[in-house]
């Protein structure tokens, strides 16, 4: 997709996080992931854990994840019990037992929706089955308005090493218009608690192109982010996947896209990069800046992009085990009932070919801005410069990247729209299919 040709932010998925596309994952392939789970693994492959907490105070208008609003303590307790049972089942399968976790990620939804008591309960119940004490990184997503001082201390107590704070904007009118549950005062209060308690890494998220965004407001948002001086700043360019509230309103009411066009979002992203680099930050990927490239590594992302094992737990969560993709059931009641019956809640799967795994790792690592050729030669026995020669030549001519025998390097122009470049590396039958 050439964003310079399309311009307007239309409905559809732009952000690439896997390959083959999720739309190709099928229920009929679930037997394959069950086979893999019950086979002896290649234990040299690093293994991590994803825990999905699907609860939120409010659904954002741009959210496309499986979330449930304003759930009571009884539902949450039932969910935690189901997670415990799922952990028990997984900890006994051949591919997982006797292995240690290298990383853990609590995603959502809003993991910080859970109370301190519930978080301690999760730690106590789950860590005896699959302990994250060995993990080099334990990331926890937070919504500012769900935090208090006690809860932040609890996060440190349960072993969280990396906090990711969903700020998105510092403008209350924008936050309200886009359906965010928190307001700016909650951001500063939460950030102060996080700094007081102290974590090895703190990330804050911003979104370029929320409804109502202006040049002046974006400039102020980036300046305030720089003043907070977190270890990582992640900036997403707003998109409109099919199942967001905004997308549904556009379809039902026939309204034009209320989101800034791609040219504007790329300009805002470039301005943010320039500003943050002047403050000492380094570009770590097309949407992430870090203070120190040596220490501020996002280990979960690094492993995801390199095809390592990730155990999926919780409703709708995605996993990858010994070369096979899979996803859990995506409706809360279905997930709960299946686990309570004693069955693993896997809904769909896909086993990519060797060539598809090569494509997946190449395109995901390209999002980091630079891909070295030797690791691909070592792992796949393939020269990626020869393998992708046509696409590389096209994109070099267009000014998106440069390459030689040792590496492929995105230019700034390429970094600003990295995801739009990736489908050219897909196999032909996947280039025009729906992504999700």
Image (cartoon, rainbow, N blue to C red):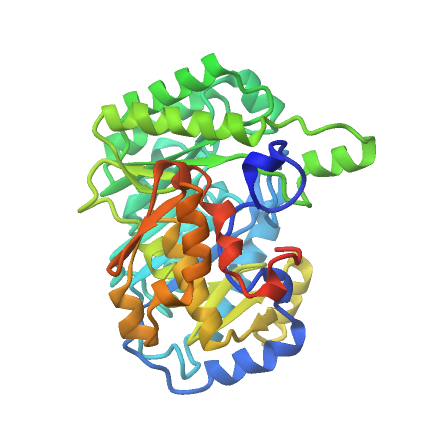
Residue 102 picture location, percent across and down: 29, 63
Front in this rendered view, residue 290 or 387? 387
Quadrant of the image occupied by residue 112: top left
Q: Residue furthest right?
A: 253
Q: Can residue 125 be seen here?
A: no
Q: Seen in the image, is 106 located left or right of residue 426? A: left
From this view, report whether residue 308 is shown above or below residue 38: above
Give coordinates of residue 320: x percent, y percent: 46, 68
Image quadrant in which the C terminus is located:
bottom right
Residue depicted at x 50% and y 41%: 113
Relative to 193, is 107 on the left or the right? right
Instruction: Classify residue 424 as left or right of residue 291.
Output: right
Task: Say above or below: 176 vs 322.
Answer: above
Q: Is residue 414 visible?
A: yes
The residue lying furthest to the top in this view is 216
Determine the residue positioned at 48% across, 76% down: 89
Q: Position of residue 398 (x, y in %)?
A: 44, 42
Query: Residue at image x 31%, y 68%?
Result: 376
* Of residues 339 and 292, the one drawn nearer to the viewer in this rendering: 292
**Front one among 380 and 229:** 380
How many tags in the picture?
0
Give the image quarter of residue 397: top left
Q: Position of residue 364 (x, y in %)?
A: 41, 56
Q: Nearer the viewer, residue 54 or 231?
A: 231
């Amino acid at each position: 997709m050439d964003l310079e040709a399309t311009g307007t932010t239309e409905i559809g998925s732009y952000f690439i996080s896997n390959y083959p596309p999720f739309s190709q994952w099928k229920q009929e392939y679930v037997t394959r992931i069950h086979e893999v789970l019950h086979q002896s693994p290649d234990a040299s492959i690093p293994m991590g854990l994803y825990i999905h907490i699907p609860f939120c105070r409010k659904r954002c208008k741009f959210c496309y994840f499986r979330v449930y609003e304003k759930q009571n303590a009884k539902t949450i307790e039932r969910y935690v019990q189901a997670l415990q049972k799922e952990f028990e089942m997984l900890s006994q399968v051949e591919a997982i037992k006797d292995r240690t976790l290298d990383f853990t990620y609590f995603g959502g939804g809003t993991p910080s929706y859970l109370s301190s008591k519930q978080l301690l309960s999760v730690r106590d119940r789950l860590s005896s089955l699959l302990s994250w004490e060995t993990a080099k990184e334990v990331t926890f997503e937070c919504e500012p308005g769900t935090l208090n001082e006690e809860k932040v201390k609890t996060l440190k107590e349960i072993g969280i090493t990396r906090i990711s704070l969903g700020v998105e904007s510092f403008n209350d009118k924008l936050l309200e218009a886009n359906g965010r549950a928190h307001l700016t005062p909650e951001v500063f209060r939460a950030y102060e608690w996080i700094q007081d308690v102290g974590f090895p890494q703190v990330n804050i998220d911003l979104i370029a192109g929320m409804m109502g965004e202006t040049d002046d407001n974006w400039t102020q948002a980036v300046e305030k982010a720089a003043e907070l001086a977190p270890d990582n700043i992640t900036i997403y360019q707003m998109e409109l996947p099919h199942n967001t509230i905004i997308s549904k309103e556009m379809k039902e009411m026939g309204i034009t896209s209320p989101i800034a066009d791609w040219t504007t979002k790329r300009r805002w992203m470039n301005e943010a990069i320039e500003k943050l680099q002047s403050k000492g930050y380094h570009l770590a990927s097309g949407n992430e800046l870090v203070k120190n490239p040596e220490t501020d590594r996002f280990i979960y992302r690094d492993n995801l992009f390199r095809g390592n094992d990730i155990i999926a737990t919780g409703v709708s969560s995605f996993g990858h085990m010994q070369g096979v993709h899979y996803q859990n059931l995506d409706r809360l009641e279905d997930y709960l009932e299946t686990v309570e019956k004693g069955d693993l809640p896997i809904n769909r799967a896909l086993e990519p070919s060797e060539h598809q795994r090569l494509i997946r790792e190449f395109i995901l690592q390209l999002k980091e801005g630079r891909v070295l050729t030797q690791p691909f030669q070592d792992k796949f026995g393939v020269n990626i410069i020869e393998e992708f020669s046509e696409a590389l030549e096209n994109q070099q001519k267009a000014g998106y990247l440069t390459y030689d025998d040792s590496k492929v390097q995105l230019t700034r122009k390429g970094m600003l729209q990295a995801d739009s470049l990736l489908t050219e590396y897909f196999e032909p039958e996947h280039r025009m299919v729906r992504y999700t």
